[in-house]
């Protein structure tokens, strides 16, 4: 299969903002093994600004845009150095692609992106993508940003014709209620249709699920499913769960794209 895996900052970093070395090493090992199995792997990775904050010894995440851009520029180097070193240990070559909204909105630039992705996969490289946070800002009133990597990964999945999109985050999946406040909350293992009721569940006013990013994940699911791509939300604390997800075994919440579109 052609699999897009998105990893959030919560998966890559400790609460201190520093790299979670053990988890990143395990993630790279599992992705390398899935690639050895014959899957084509595309990684959409957050974490550049956070790593830049640490590298620049800043007291915390910057509030002003120029410092955020500077942290992203420094952190992206550190992030790619880490991936290059770790994937290299398993014999895999990584490639960096940084995107802005124009790269997927304008037909010619979108084709250029699709062409380079296809060629990289043909050459057995493992593309690592992120938004180009060093230059993409909306401060001048022009929408140059995609905004967050849940949406970015779904757009990427559509552009490359992926079979599966996996969002690794700090949550186990979509629940019937907020599991942090409601002991009766139940994990929803499979979603065949994203209904208004489901969207209200994830993004209601004051909802911890919504503020935790579940609304953006449902948006990503709608984009991916519309392209015939399954999407799974799973907890990034256990990268080995990727084996079960790739095999189609129950894990997290799976949003059906292929089967739902075929029925």
Image (cartoon, rainbow, N blue to C red):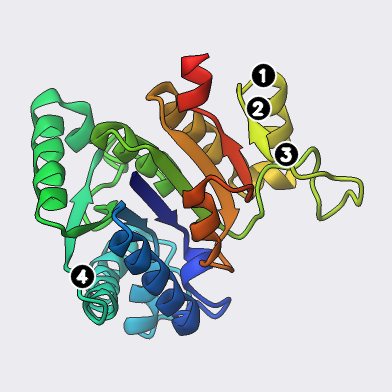
Near-viewer residue (54 or 116): 116
Residue shown at 81% from the left, 41% from the top: 177
Residue beneath disc 2: 199
Residue beneath disc 3: 188
Gap between marks 1 and 4 measured at Cα: 42 Å
Please provide percent x and percent y for residue 144.
26, 38
Residue shown at 73% from the left, 39% from the top: 188
Please provide percent x and percent y for residue 102.
19, 34
In the displayed structure, would residue 250 be above or below residue 88? above
Q: Secondary structure at mark 2?
A: helix
Q: Of tags 3 and 2, which is closer to the observer?
A: 3
Residue shown at 73% from the left, 32% from the top: 201
Q: 10 Å neighbourhood of mark 2: few (<14), some, or many (≥20)?
A: some
Near-viewer residue (16 or 260): 260
Which of the two labelled residues, at mark 1 and mark 4, occupies the earlier sequence position?
A: 4
Left or right? Give the position of 74 relative to 30: left
Residue shown at 42% from the left, 46% from the top: 148
Gap between marks 2 and 1 measured at Cα: 5 Å
Which of the two labelled residues, at mark 4 and mark 2, occupies the earlier sequence position?
A: 4
Q: Secondary structure at mark 1?
A: helix
Quarter holding residue 88: bottom left
Please provide percent x and percent y for residue 101.
25, 37
Residue beneath disc 4: 92
Quarter holding residue 93: bottom left
Gap between marks 3 and 1 measured at Cα: 16 Å
Q: Is residue 55 visible?
A: yes
Residue beneath disc 1: 196
Tag 3 and tag 1, C-beta contact below 8 Å: no
Q: Of tags 1 and 4, which is closer to the observer?
A: 4
């Amino acid at each position: 299969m052609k699999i897009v895996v998105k990893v959030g900052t919560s998966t890559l970093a400790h609460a201190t903002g520093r790299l979670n070395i053990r988890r990143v090493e395990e993630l790279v090992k599992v992705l390398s093994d899935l690639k050895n199995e014959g899957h084509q792997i595309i990684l959409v990775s957050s974490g550049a600004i956070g790593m830049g904050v640490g590298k620049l010894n800043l007291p915390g995440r910057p509030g002003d845009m120029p410092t955020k851009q500077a942290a992203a520029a420094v952190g992206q180097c550190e992030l790619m150095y880490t991936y290059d070193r770790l994937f290299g240990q398993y014999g895999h070559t990584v490639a960096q692609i940084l995107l802005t909204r124009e790269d997927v909105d304008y037909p010619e630039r979108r084709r250029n992106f699709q062409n380079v992705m296809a060629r990289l996969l043909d050459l057995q490289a493992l593309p690592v993508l992120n938004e180009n946070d060093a230059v993409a800002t909306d401060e001048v009133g022009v929408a140059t940003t995609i905004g967050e990597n849940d949406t970015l990964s779904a757009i990427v999945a559509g552009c490359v014709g992926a079979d599966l999109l996996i969002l690794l985050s700090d949550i186990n999946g979509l629940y019937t209620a907020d599991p942090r406040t409601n002991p009766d909350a139940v994990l929803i293992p499979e979603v065949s249709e994203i209904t208004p009721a489901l969207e209200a569940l994830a993004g209601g006013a004051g909802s911890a699920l919504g503020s935790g990013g579940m609304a953006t994940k449902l948006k990503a699911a709608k984009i991916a499913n519309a392209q015939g791509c399954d999407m799974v939300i799973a907890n990034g604390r256990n990268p080995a769960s990727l084996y079960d997800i790739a095999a189609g075994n129950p894990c997290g919440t799976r949003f059906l794209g292929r089967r739902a579109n075929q029925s």
